[in-house]
Each structure stands twice: as C-alpha cells, then as structure tokens.
Amino acid sequence: MANSLKLTLKRPSLWGFTAPLTAALSGVFGYIAGTSFGNPLLGIVAGAVIGAVLAAVLHPMPEKRMMARLGVVALFFAVGLFATNLGGGIAAAIVGAVLSWFVFWIDTGDYRKGVPIYYTRAQTLWHNSFLFLCGLIFFFLIAPLFPVMWLSFNAQNFFTFTPEMLAFDPDGYSLKHYRDFLTTDEWMQPLKNSLIIAPIATVISVTLGTLAAIGLSQSHVPGRQTIMAILISPMIVPLIISATGMFFFYAPLGNWLELSLGLNKAFVGYVKVILAHAVLGVPFVIITVTATLVGFDRSLTRAAANMGANPVTTFFRVQMPLILPGVISGGLFAFITSFDEVVVVLFVGSAQQQTLPWQMFTGLREQISPTILAAATILVTISILLLTTVELLRRRSERLRGLSPS
Amino acid sequence: MTDTTTSGPMLSADGVPLKTSLARALRRQKLRALILIAPLLAFVVLTFVVPIGSMLFRSVENQIVSGTLPKTIEALETWEGQDGTLPDQEVFQALFFDMFRAAEAKEHTKLGSRLNYERTGFSSVFRTTGRSLDDIGEPFQDWLEDADPAFAEGLTWYEIFSGTGGEDLIEERRAIWANMVGEGFAGDIGFTLSGEMAQLLPQTAAAYSDWAIYTAIVEDDVVAEEDPWEAVYAALALDLARDGAASALAAYSGAGAAPIANALAALPSLPEIDFRAAFIAENDGWGDTGNWQTLKIYSPDYTAGYFLNAIDMEKGLDGATARPESQQIYVKLFIRTMIMSLIITGSCILLGYPVAWLLANLPVRSANVLMILVLLPFWTSLLVRTSAWKVLLQQQGVINDILVWLGFVDDANRLILMNNSTGTIIAMTHILLPFMILPLYSVMKTIPPSYLRAAKSLGATNWTAFWRVYFPQSIPGIGAGSILVFILAIGYYITPEIVGGTDGVFISNRIAHHISSSLNWGLAAALGSILLVLVLALYWLYDRIVGIDNVKLGG
C-alpha cells in the first residue's frame, strides 16, 4: 500500500536517530569483542564510537550502498585478521556486514517499508521487534543443527570447539570422523541394516497403503471412520507403547517361525523389524495419498472405462500417474519413519539388526566417539535431499491439480 | 424405449428393475472398496492391533504361579493365613514335588524373580531351595536302597510302573509340564503307565510320570535306562507310609513285588517325614507367613496386581492398600510426565504462534522459503536433533562456553542445563515445535486478513483487533497443535533418556527400564496400558475437535 502511494519517506536525522541507534548496536558487539580481550567496558565505548563514526561516514552515500557495504566488510575483516586470526577476521566481517546493513536500513527509512504509512513510531518499533522475535525463533529452530555439522570436522575427539577450530586453522579440522564412519564395521553394519530395513518396509507400506487409500476414497465405504481410526492409530499411539506391545507379540512369533518353520534366526529378526516398521509407516502413506485423492477427478476413470480400459489398466495408466506425487511423498515419509526409528527396533530387533539410529542412541547414551556427529551430518544431508524432493513433488502435484501455483 | 409399459417398476437396459440394479451396483462398489482396504486392514490388525492387545493381556496375566506350582496352589486354597500360622504339611509336600519338577526344568528361578517384584527376597528363597531339593529327598532314597538294593536300579522302577491303563495320569502330567514350560510335550515317551500302580501308589506314579516325561522329552534319554529323581523315592516313601497302603499292597504280585514288600517291612526304620521343617531348614523364607500370603495373593491366573503396583498400591489378602510413602514413584512420575508435557506444549504455543502468524501473513513466495526453516528440523532425524542438544547443553557444551566467554557465568559454576528437566523441556520444545507450527499455520491461512483491517477501521487498537477478532479464530489451530504436541510429548522416550538424567525422565523411560533392565514385563505392560488409555482419550478429543481426516503433513 505504501508503495502504491508513491510517497517518498522522509529520511530520519543522522545525529538524532541513525547514529545513536547504530552506536547502541555497535556497543553490544563491542562488549562481546571487549570481553574476549578482557576489557568489556572499553569494548562498549570503542564499539559505540565506531558505530557513530560508521553512521556518519555512510550517511551521505545511500546511492552507492553495495560498494559502501563491501568496503566496510573488507575493512572489518582486515582489522579482525590483523588483531587476532582468521576466525576473528571472519567474525569481524560478519559484524561489519550487519552494522553496515543496519545503518542503511535505518538511515534510508527502509525500516518503515513493511508497515502502513500511518503507523506511529511505537507501532513501527513493535512491528520490527516482532520480526526480530520471529527471527530469533527461526534461529532456535535451525541453529542447533550447525554446531553438530561444524564439530563433525573436529580434529580432536571432543564434543566442544577447540581454539584451532575457532581460528579456522586447517590443523583444527579433519575428516577423520567421516573416515571412522565409512571404514569401521561398527557404523557400516548399522548403515547397511538401515538400508535393508527401511526400503523394504517402505515398499510394503506404500503398496498396501495406496490400495487402501484408493478404497477409502470411494464414496460408499461401510465403517469408514472406524477403519480410518485403526489405520491411523500406529501414528497416534506413542512409540514406547507400540514397542512394548510388539516386544510381547513378536518374540513368541519369532520363536514360532524359527522352531516350526525352521527359518534362519537372522532372517526372522529382519522380518520382525521390517513388519514393525512397515506398520508404523502406513498412516503417513494413507494420509498423503488420501489428501492427493481428494482433488482427483473421478470422471477421468469413468472416461477410461468408457473407452474400454479395464480397471487395472485404468489404475496404472490414468489414476496412478496423477496420484504418483502423493504416493512418493507418502513413501518418503514412510522411509524416514523407518530410517529414523529407534525405540521399536531396540525392543524388537537383536544386535544383528542394529540400525543407524540405534547405534547413535547407544553412542549418545554412553558418550563414546564424535563419529556420531559425522553420522548426524550425513543424516542431515539426507534429510535435506528428502525435504527438497517432497517439496518439489508437492508443488508438481498442486500444479497438476490446477491449484495455486507457487 | 417406447415399448416399456408405464405400469410396474422402472427397468434398466437389461430388463432388471432399476432399483435392484442400482442396489447391486452399490453393493459391488462397496465390495470393491472393502477388497482394496482389506489387505492393509488385516496387516495393521495383525502387526499392530494384536501386539497392543497382547500388551493389555500381559498387564493382567499371571499364569506363571499356578503353572509352576499347580498342586501347591491347590493345597493352599484352604489356608487362610491371616492368623499368622504356616500352611500345613500337605502344602509343603505339594511344594516339594512342584519345586522339584520346576527346578529340574530350571523354571523355579523365573517364578522366584516374578514373586520378587511383589516381595523382595523371594528370588533368593527360590534359588537356594532349588539347589538343595536333592538333599531333602536323599534320606528317602537311602532308606529305600537300604531296604532293597534293587531300588538303586532304574530298570526296577521301570518294570514296576510299566503297564497299561494309566494314560490319563500321563496326559495330566504332560499338561502340567506344558503349562510350566510351554509347548512341545506331546509325542512318545517310550513308557506307558500301569493303571494298577496309578491306583496303588498314586503319588509315586505321578512323580515317576513327571520324571519319565522329562527324561524322554527334555533330556532325550531312554526311560528304562535312567535312575529316577530323589522326588520319586520320596513319593514312594510317602505312599508306603500312608494308612492302608500295606494292606492294599499285600495282594500285589506284579513286577517288583519283592522290593516293595521289603520296603514295607522296613517301614519302622523310615526317617521322619517333615517337609515343612526341611524347607525351613533350607531357607527360613519358607517359615515367613508374609511370603506365603504373597504366594496366595498372586496365585490366580489373572491379577490386578500389576495395575495396583502401577498406581503405587499393593495387593493384600484384604484388598488393595496404598504403598508406604517412600515407595510411591509411579503416580508422581505420571504427574511429572503430564506437567512437563504441558510445559512443553505451552512453550510450543508461545514460540509457534508468532512464527505461524508471520508465515500466514507473508506473501506466498517468502512464506515458502521460511517454511523450509520449519520443515528442515521436522525432517531431520530425531537422533540428530537430540545429539545437537547434547552438544549444546552439556556443561562443557557450546551454550555454557559462550556464556562463560561473555562473562555472564563464572567458569566454576557453569549452568547445569542437561540431565535434568530443563534439558528435556528445551530439547523437546525444539523437537516438537514444527508439530505446533504446521497446524497453526494451516488454520491461520484460512482467516481472511480483511477481518483485522475491518476491526481497525472500526476503531479498534492493534491489540483489541488481534485479541477480539484474530485470536478467537485461531483457537482451533492452537487446540489441534496442542493436542498433537501433548500426545507426542507424553510418550517420548529417546530425548528424555539422553538429556533427561534422572529428574527429567518420563513414564516411558520407566516402561523401557522394566522391559529391558528389571524384566518386570507385567508392570511395564500395566504402565503402558494406563498411558495408552490416556493417549486414546486425547486422540478421541483430537478427533472431535479437528477430525482425524484433517491431519496434514508438511503444510
């Protein structure tokens, strides 16, 4: 709205507004820097002065904003590098980037861009504080993952940052935890197990789940509510209860399979875990496929039947391609459920079926090696890949169904 | 078309009344839907619902006591036990034979540990007694072998008891074995019991059959070639010493009549039969009426005892009573689980609401980008996020390091953020936050922004407009998210186990402890059943408020 009115915002005064605010923010950074040199008070004062000077210097050049910011970042980096080490340089460069952005944000009146023109100062302040608060919450959501990834390159066997790491000294970094992960049986066997169990469990839950979802989406299903409740229940019942129940039921079942049918013990172990994981994945498949089927145009199947296709052909040539995105994302959910599951496998499986999460859980409980962090980083990478796939599929599905393209 | 008569029911193209035809089509449609659903339904019922049912069954099942000591429990029925007297000799006699059988099959220690959950000390009572049962039987063996050395030969025994007509007794003993150990007691044992002996020497026949079944099926030996247990000797001594046994046996002239006659003649030198004294001598736990009361209380096949334990009560002869204060843990733990789940739900609302509001009010493109920040943790392995919090929260961890470096915290008293409830609450809020944001977001998307503008143009302040107009419309989202987060939180196991220490654990950790460490599976099942009921109640509530069909994943 503010844009459509084409009003130019009045620039706030330099010494009455921009400089004091920048000095305050800069003072906070100064305090942090000062603490690391052992003199917080001096840090605050120096920071405030630097902030005020920066505001004054940048004030006349709002047109050359990019150049000016690059200059500030380079200057801060050089000072930081000279005063401490590479780590200090990078930290200083970040501070420089934030400060110079802040100066222009305040100084050019950009901070009022998100609010209607009639907002008072207090309302604008509240709006921006709210955005800052949301930023903090996003930080809380995402930040905990970074130390793990960073520490996984630690050259020491610690769970904490070493001074070398903070200085970005190449000696402080190594890939040895990744080497450990990729070369020892202790980790490769669980990975192998996870890669055996999760795909098979996924195939079972996707096959049965898709069929059932199609059945459930028909218009006349007796006892639909009850059936749905039963099929969704593995997701709702806490894992610890499912695991306890399965522990009581699968142990005698396994013994029976071994004794009566003479099956191999390891094989029976895998069967038990796979069945347990497959049933845990079912609700996710049901939910996603049902959601896709809501937008499915029934006249398409009728048209296919009209033209002489039998139900099987109709399913594979007409229905399946259209609901495929839902099926695949349901499958990915089922896969991640199994791949990430530890409680049930802990109760139902034996040491032979130890999966990756199980190994991580044991490692975390007994605090053995930082190889866990390498494993965690690899898992984060996998989940980023899965998330991207699901997002792309979801958009594709929305496009296919003619919903709002985004 | 024109030749269709106007009277009579409307017909479809093939001449069938339209109504029937439609009904048939509908039926076929229903059937097809059910055929599509049936495989999955059967799969879920078999692999999930039945296991849950087996857990519920486990929480009341108590067949181990009557399975291991069947005759003792029978004999104990007449014993009242309130007045502090011990059970009479008959009970101890039955106990001797039951225990002997259980000890040979190594089942007595299982019963010992089962009863130990109800009364400490039982485990050692059963273990030590199991080792010394031979000693109790030995005097009788010596006596019989002194009376006639033929009793030292396994073959003598085999000849005496071989015959026909005792099949019923053999089957009865087989059933007792199967009850105690499990399946696998069918099949030929290379021995058939004489019906005459089953009448003349009932106890011995029973003990000998027990031994024969064990020898043939468990040990895989030939019955005729092995020497029987001491218990069989003791049984024979008991049978011979019974009133009227001598006169009944006088007419016996089958195999082994001579050794039996010799034994009858030696009766005056038979050592005194006092099983009660013998048991108490082996372990004075048997002289403790409290132990016998516990045994009697837990003798039925099904018991509410596990549930009573799960709510800090105990079962006595006169009904349930509360446990002493110092032993009450589960109710407290349930309450703590609830309170901590509530705190976690509350913090998720506090943190999730602003973010969901922002996402719902931003242009779609930027909202989608920010949504990734919510979905990434959601997709990241639970173990990864838990390990991340372990790295952050420990005393030498990242957060404490930063606080010390900034001088907010003294190096000597670093904050204890982990291994207590703080750690559990922080980590679980982070882990469950996406489950709050996603339902809130989907509800807020449907609230038209014009309502807020309308309220403001009518003179409402920002706060009034939000509180009176926007917030009430977002309550369904809060409800859905809260129930979801609460249900998930209440049954969490992994995160409390790793960052919770002892103060921050949930009821689920206790269940896992009973499954894997203390092996008190019945109690674990009872705790699980109570938790299940709680969750199902919440699930029902969720269904009423949100509807199970409206669960959405990933926006």
Image (cartoon, rainbow, N blue to C red):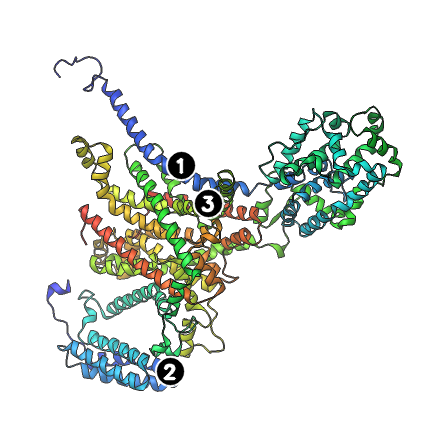
Which residue in the protein does label 3 denote? Answer: A268
Is B499 on the left or on the right of A36, as rendered?
Answer: right
Q: Which secondary structure, mark 3?
A: helix
Letter of the chain that mark 1 sits on in the rendering: B
x, y percent for residue A390: 27, 53
In front: A290, or B278?
B278
Lower sequence index among marks 2 and 3: 2
Letter of the chain that mark 3 sits on in the rendering: A
* Type of the residue with mark 3: Val
In front: B322, or A144?
A144
Which residue in the protein does label 2 denote? Answer: A36
Alpha-carbon distance for marks 2 and 3?
Answer: 59 Å
Q: Which residue is drawn at 79% across and 30% down?
A: B256
Which residue in the protein does label 1 denote? Answer: B42
Q: Which residue is drawn at 22% across and 48% down?
A: A397
Q: Which residue is drawn at 69% across and 24% down?
A: B165
User: Are the residues flagged by discs 2 and 3 from a single subunit?
Assistant: yes
Q: Which secondary structure, mark 1?
A: helix
Dot in front, 2 or 3: 3
